[in-house]
Image (tube, rainbow, N blue to C red):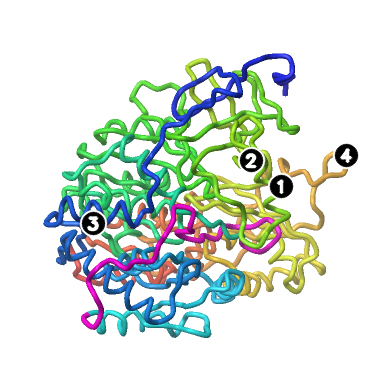
Amino acid sequence: MKKPISETKKSSIHAIESGYLVTYNILNNTKTPYPNVTLNELLSKQAEITPTNIALEFHDLKITYFELHKKVNQLAHYLKAQGVQSGDFIAVSIPRSPELLYTLLAIMQCGAAYLPLDPEYPIERLKFMLEDSSAKILLTSKTLAASSPTWTLTLLIEDAMKSLNLYSSSPLNSNVTPNDNAYLLYTSGSTGKPKGVPITHKNLVNFLCSMALEPGINENDRLLSITTISFDIASLELYLPLIKGATLILADQEIARDGLLLLKLIKKENISFLQATPTTWSMLLDSGWSKPLPLKALCGGESMSIDLAKELTNKCYSLWNMYGPTETTIWSSIKQIKADDALITIGKPIANTQFYIIDDQGQLMAPEEIGEIAIGGDGVAKGYWNRPELTAEKFTKNRFSLTKKDILYRTGDLGKILSNNEIECLGRLDQQVKIRGFRIEPGEIEQSLLSLEGIKYAVVLANDVFLIAHIVPDSSIESAKILIPSWRKSLASQLPSHLVPHYFNLLEKLPTTLNGKIDRKALLEYNFFAESNQEYTAPRTSKEKLVAEIWQETLKKERIDIFSNFFEIGGHSIVAVKIAVKIKKKTGIRIPLSAVFQHSTIEKFAKLLNTENKI
């Protein structure tokens, strides 16, 4: 890095604020005020303005704004009767459904904050989140209760919905303030434990009001929600349409995961607004998307490639690149991408947000110089829940702001301010990676690996869309090979599926640099995908041969044993979509994505081709 600008020598500093490059004296930092209201108030006001508009669609169900808020109000009174108070955390584990939306809105109306629990996460991880947050209640469903952690007070959403008519349909008067928490979201932690980020109504309202202006939404829009609530971008999908009279279309879990079904739904429901990660957009493109659609497309969670940008600008009405960590409330910057853009930047900050490029001492870098991206403004969270040391490290005083209480969040991302006043993001300072939109701390996976029997050293790295665990066993490599299935099973019981490595590379020792540090670059370049020494059972039938050819072509492997597990040889949901598309082209049979998860070997998958499920 070059020498930073020193504010002791210059009377003004360079930063980007609320979408504009500004050279300002520290005393002249102005803001664009938004109404000092809670999300509850914004939503209620919109329901008064457009009571007969369709607020929510789910399968064949259509719910007006009036009907939505009636149920939310009743459920809020029910929750209050169960003891929910302002400041409580309420854990939520409910399938994607209208009841899920009612629940989130009712919890916030009580002045409480919701803690999303993904039912697919291992029970130990869910238990940690419940205990760390001191959640007052676990609200779940009959179908998920059996697989949920045991909690002191557990309520079933079915029981709540049956009793709604006993409660008032008027809004609950709970004196919620903008500084109250709206939700608590846990992200991957480098120390081996996830860390909680509490987001306030002020944080969320600032974000949503800014999004309503740019990229913009109006009451004629139809927004499709496909994201699990354990991923913070779901808040845009669920709440943005509801503060502007638009319609929220809620996709169920099966459709959200299956590119073929998702593309079909987008067309059928005349969707005009869709947010997804680059991985999901690629899945849609691989699902046979050929003709342009009138979509406002939001893309974020991972870096967007030039190739993906060109494809999407040709297929969508408009394309927007989004950037932001959970700690600064979902998206903190935005850029509309044009077909002729030669460089994909993260654009400029959203409203009431400031970006600073700083060195490791917190001093500002000059434009065009590389430093760490730090974010200030109304979206910055208060810190991490119950993690004062980590909070002090990542959330620091904003000494560039006139307001003494303002703080900066150090993102750990490298970037620079370009001559066109936009920000270019240049990757991570640390080892953190993003795969399919999930923020992953390899350190968390490494800690879990080291707790397992038979592992002496472990380094986890990302290769394209794969996580690779490089392991030095405490015995011979031959002896350790038989332990890999048990390691995988143990990790799956502790970590979400996106944190379980796709590959396990066994080494006698880890490569090191000249100064004795682990040579991560050498590990990234290490080729261990050859499978010549593995047992191999060849396809026996014509259908197995067809499936094997498609799997080998898609996974880029010379041969695959018919009993090898798809997800243990590099497969994941995006690859599964490509396979389903190729099967459809070859045979005319549509295999649902869920079937790949249930029939994850060539031998089992080939049996699906005996079906007459042709479309």
Q: Are marks 2 and 1 in contact (CB under 8 Å)?
A: yes
**Which residue type carries mark 4?**
Asn
Dot 3 corresponds to which residue? 249
The part of the image, by quadrant, that contains residue 484 is bottom right
Label 3, label 1: how far apart the Cα atoms are:
40 Å
Residue 502 position within the rendered picture, expressed as x and y whole percent measured from the top left: 57, 59
Dot 1 corresponds to which residue? 393
Q: Are marks 4 and 1 in contact (CB under 8 Å)?
A: no
Q: Quadrant of the N terminus?
A: top right
Dot 4 corresponds to which residue? 515
User: Residue 467 has which mark?
Assistant: none
Magenta-highlighted residues: 165-194
Disc 4 vs disc 2: which is toward the camera?
2
Of the two numbered discs 2 and 1 on the same chain, state the one appearing first in sequence. Answer: 1
Quick one: 387 or 539, which is closer to the camera?
A: 387
**Which residue type carries mark 3?**
Ile
Label 2, label 1: how far apart the Cα atoms are:
8 Å
**Which residue type carries mark 2?**
Arg
Q: Secondary structure at mark 2?
A: strand
Specify the farthest residue to the right: 515
Residue 104 position within the rendered picture, expressed as x and y whole percent measured from the top left: 37, 65
Label 4, label 2: how far apart the Cα atoms are:
28 Å
User: Residue 410 has which mark?
Assistant: 2
Of the two numbered discs 3 and 4 on the same chain, state the one appearing first in sequence. Answer: 3
Crowding near the residue tagged with mark 2, few <14, some 14–19, many ≥20 C-alpha atoms within 10 Å: many
Asked if residue 174 is among those painted magenta in the image, a careful observer would answer yes
Residue 174 to residue 188: above or below: below
Of the two numbered discs 2 and 3 on the same chain, state the one appearing first in sequence. Answer: 3
**Which residue type carries mark 1?**
Glu
389 relative to 232 in the view: left or right: right
